[in-house]
Image (cartoon, helix red, strand yellow):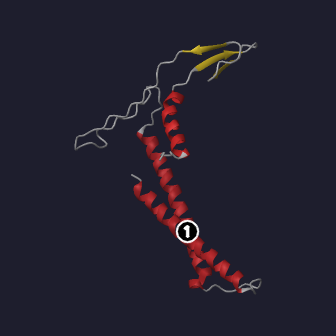
Amino acid sequence: MKHLIPGFLIVAAMSAISAPALAQSNIFLCVDAQGTKEYKNTGDTKGCKKVDLPPLTVSAAPRSTSAGSGAANRPQPATPSDFPKVDGGTQKTRDNDRRQILQDELKTEQQKLNDLEKVYNNGVPERQGNERNYAKYQDRVASMKDDLTRSQKNIEALNRELSNLK
């Protein structure tokens, strides 16, 4: 009795075998009549020359095995020598401006929440004249509840940002 190999296994095996070959395919530099350069993976047109590239190598980042691996062992990003520096006074002014903006946003959001809570009336807002259909009223109440929840989350986020300031 012959053993039949399902077609999908053959396709999977062929893909696995050909994947490295695709990653190392040839690159051709083609120059047309106007002098425009174009890189292609086929050199089937006139003016194409094969480009010799070094083989691709993939290396993993070295892992630290010490118990104290943390922020101290991470390489710090290099700062260019011509990168603009900010003096302490300017930074303090910026931080104060940021704090003031966040406090203003918090005050506005708290006022919005108070207004929404008044209108929401503990889940029983007054029906409007255009809400003869009860489903329309329920949709408005659900929307109001979503607005309340969103406003509460905004207040939490603003308080969190304010507490993170120096």
Residue 24 or residue 31, whichever sits in front = 24
- Please state if 77 lies on the left or on the right of 44 as rendered: left
Identify residue for label 1: 151
Which residue sits furthest front?
Answer: 1
The answer to whether residue 34 is above or below residue 12 is above
Which residue occupies the extreme right position in the image? 130
Q: Position of residue 120 (x, y in %)?
A: 60, 81
Q: Is residue 109 above or below residue 117?
A: above
Name the residue: 65% across, 18% down. 43
* For residue 55, side relative to residue 62 (left or right): right
Give 114 or 60, whichever is nearer the viewer: 60
Query: Which residue is at the front of the view, 67 or 47?
Result: 47
Q: Residue at x 59, y 15 (%)?
A: 50
Q: Residue at x 41, y 53 (%)?
A: 165
Percent of width and height locating residue 71: 31, 42
Disc 1 element: helix
Frontmost residue, 52 versus 38:
52
Q: Up-down: is 159 above or below 44?
A: below
* Residue 63 placement (x, y as % from top left): 30, 38
Amino acid at pointer 1: Ser
Quadrant for residue 51, please give it. top right
